[in-house]
Image (cartoon, helix red, strand yellow):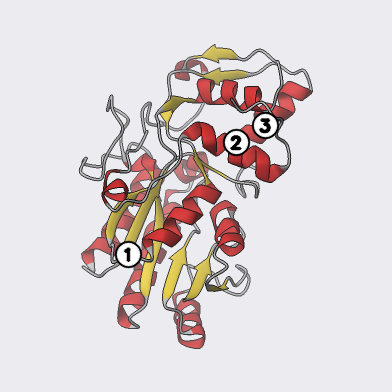
Amino acid sequence: MRVLLIGGSGQLGAEIVRRWSDCAVIAPPRVELDLENVQAVSDAIQAHRPDVLINCAAFHNVDRCTIEPERAFAVNALAVGAMARLCALHDVRFVTVSTDYVFDGSAQNPYTEDDAPNPISAYGTSKLAGEYLVEMLQSRALVVRTCGLFGVRVSSSKGYTFVDQIVAKARAGESIRIVNDVIASPTYAGHLAQVMRALLDTDAFGVYHACNVGPVSWYDFAVEALRQADIAHPIEPISAAEWKTDTRRPAYSALANKKLDALGITMPPWQSAITAYLTDKGDRSAKTS
């Protein structure tokens, strides 16, 4: 299978390149293929003749999206819609990655694909707009929503991953304060890449959730990360109200993989996501049980 990958240098894209060894993955750097350049994307499709185009690129700095909503919509919505149209025109399967931030966080149980989106930020709204532009085509495109993505490749917008930051601060003896009332489904990019590859072996289309299993607060996630790294260091739980940010974020955005489970494709629990991440980083002790 020939795969044209946009965003191959990111956390998820790097895992696709590394793990999809049974595919011919073409991942041009951004300087060669900018997803906002419709003609460049069209030329790439015609030049490489892929079976699948995977879009892992996004403007995902949530606070910057609030300040720059026009750019958020240009990247996360308009460019995604244009790619989907080109794929439909050239009979190329299209897969794009979306987010838990399409929900408002008022739920008390993990969101399924049947729940109605209601974003509360420019980032979430722009990503949902991208989903709608894909769905309007009524093609066999896939929208894969995930949550709290982290991978061995550092985040391009932050320069670090959440686990790295916690481990580094603990080893430096610094104080750590983490919110304990924001619930999510942190997902390891390596696991997500494997599940996306499995999805391509099915005839699935539409919106699918794909997250490591089990809702967890960021505080509990951090505590478990230090436990698995065999680092004894206190973490102070704080409320979201104490964490100063200019952007509203959903207080509860855990996702349930309802449609994925129906296909018999499963994701490991969030604890295993930490284990796999620390193992791949070469930064894991034997303390995993």
Query: Looking at the rendered structure, which numbered label has been put on residue 73?
Result: none
* Secondary structure under the numbered disc 3 in the rendered image: helix
What is the C-alpha distance between the residues marked 3 and 1? Answer: 37 Å
Q: Nearer the viewer, mark 3 or mark 1?
A: 1
Q: For this rendering, which residue is in front, 11 or 24?
A: 24
Q: Residue 197: which quarter of the image?
A: bottom left
Residue 234 seen: yes
* Secondary structure under the numbered disc 2 in the rendered image: helix
Number of other residues with Cα within 10 Å of mark 2, as a class: few under 14, some 14 to 19, many 20 or more? many
Q: Which residue is mark 2?
A: 275
What is the C-alpha distance between the residues marked 3 and 2? Answer: 16 Å
Q: For this rendering, which residue is in front, 230 or 124?
A: 230
> Residue 61, position in %: x, y?
52, 44
* Secondary structure under the numbered disc 1 in the rendered image: loop
Number of other residues with Cα within 10 Å of mark 1, as a class: few under 14, some 14 to 19, many 20 or more? few
The amino acid on which the numbered mark 2 sits, given as a three-letter code, is Thr
- Mark 3 / mark 2, whichever is N-terminal: 3
The amino acid on which the numbered mark 3 sits, given as a three-letter code, is Gln
Q: Which residue is mark 1?
A: 202
- Mark 3 / mark 1, whichever is N-terminal: 3
> Residue 261, position in %: x, y?
30, 46
The amino acid on which the numbered mark 1 sits, given as a three-letter code, is Thr
Number of other residues with Cα within 10 Å of mark 3, as a class: few under 14, some 14 to 19, many 20 or more? few
